[in-house]
Image (cartoon, rainbow, N blue to C red):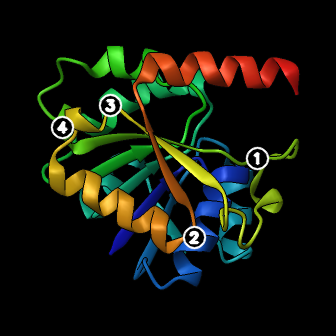
Amino acid sequence: MVVVVVGIGLIGGSMALALRDKGLASKLIGVDSNAEHTKQAVELGLVDEVASLDDAVAQADLIVLATPVNALLSLTEQVLNGVTSQVVLDVGSTKTGVLDAIRNHPKRSRFVATHPMWGTEYSGPEAAVKGAFVGKAVVICNKDESDADAAEIVERIYQSLGMHLVYMNAGDHDVHVAYVSHIS
């Protein structure tokens, strides 16, 4: 499977390492607006190559959106505009905004909203951690709004990474994450 990771920092880089380690990606393509990050991602072996967003999406089977949440709203729509049958997932910490933004998009059903419940205070490709997701939870939001095959692919990937699956609607997810982040 050709996997594109958009945003090759802590989470995106760790996801790339995990996908490679589990043999789930035949090719990893990185996309990042920070030229230093793309250079580091290739040097560190997180991705095989870098490409523009449009070129990467055209080659992809799976697109992982791992950018900061404030970039996800416009990015998700842009990626969905280039999708035919590819699966798109995000790993952002909030869900309501992005799901509201793409609610009426004709390719909405190819998108699966996810939130791996892991992170550190570090950032950038050099912060990527091998085995980061093992034993952790991933929240999948509004699964019923995604095509069954897209959701199944994403579920299999996360299970292969050693994660356990939790299902919530986006609003409940955002409330629970807000509580947890304010007490930690």
Residue plotted at (35% across, 71% down): 2
Q: Is residue 184 left or right of residue 106?
A: right
Precedes in sequence: disc 2 or disc 1: 1
Is 3 or 142 nearer to us in this picture? 142
Residue 38 image point, x, y percent: 65, 58
Amino acid type of the residue that numbered disc 2 sits on in the rendered structure:
Gly
Amino acid type of the residue that numbered disc 4 sits on in the rendered structure:
Ser
Q: Are marks 2 and 1 in contact (CB under 8 Å)?
A: no
Residue plotted at (43% across, 23% down): 170
Q: CA distance from mark 2 to mark 1?
A: 16 Å
Residue hosting label 1: 119
Is 28 or 183 nearer to us in this picture? 183
Q: Is residue 11 left or right of residue 138?
A: right
Is residue 86 visible in the rendered image? The answer is no
- Depth-wise, is mark 1 or mark 3 nearer the camera? 3
Amino acid type of the residue that numbered disc 1 sits on in the rendered structure:
Gly
Q: Secondary structure at mark 1?
A: loop
Precedes in sequence: disc 1 or disc 3: 1
Q: Is residue 60 left or right of residue 104?
A: right
Q: Is residue 23 above or below residue 167?
A: below
Precedes in sequence: disc 3 or disc 4: 4
Residue hosting label 2: 162
Q: Secondary structure at mark 3?
A: loop
- What numbered label is drawn on residue 142? 3
The quarter of the picture where residue 107 lies is top left
Q: CA distance from mark 3 to mark 4?
A: 11 Å
- What numbered label is drawn on residue 74? none
The quarter of the picture where residue 33 lies is top right
For the residue carrying disc 3, how many other residues have a C-alpha within 10 Å: few (<14), some (14-19), or many (20+)?
Answer: some
- What numbered label is drawn on residue 109? 4
Residue plotted at (46% across, 16% down): 171
Precedes in sequence: disc 1 or disc 4: 4
